[in-house]
Image: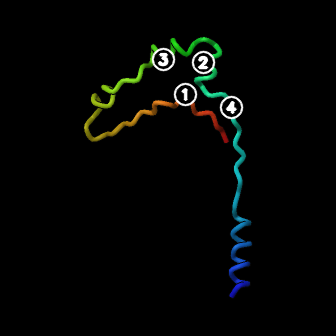
Amino acid sequence: MRWIGFLSLVALSECLVTVPLTKIKSMRETLRERDLLRDYLQRHPYSQAYKLLRKPRVTVQSMRNYLDVSVAG
């Protein structure tokens, strides 16, 4: 019985796949380096009213920190 458990763990470990992740500059860092962050945030402000103006059956949850996403893989 122990051998079956051991062999199943070995078989399971062969199925695990690692995905390499690469850290890249976030959009916020890139815009800050080019001195465009302030202009971008003024053109695209976060608005709570945006959620209220949508259709009542559709729920929209905006991401407030989407500029900080910096992992690709």
Q: Secondary structure at mark 2?
A: helix
Figure quadrant of the N terminus: bottom right
> What residue is drawn where x is 31% and y is 39%?
58
Mark 1 touching mark 2, by CB under 8 A? yes
Q: Point out residue 64 in the picture as x, y percentages from the top left corner.
A: 46, 30
Badge 4 amino acid: Ile
> What residue is drawn where x is 52% and y is 13%?
38
| Spatial CA span between label 3 and label 1 | 10 Å
| Spatial CA span between label 3 and label 4 | 21 Å
| Spatial CA span between label 2 and label 3 | 10 Å
Which residue in the structure is indicated by mark 2?
Answer: 31
Badge 1 amino acid: Leu
Q: How is the protein colored in the picture?
A: rainbow
Give whichever of discs 2 and 3 has the lower sequence position. Answer: 2
Q: Point out residue 55 in the picture as x, y percentages from the top left corner.
A: 27, 34
Which residue in the structure is indicated by mark 1?
Answer: 67
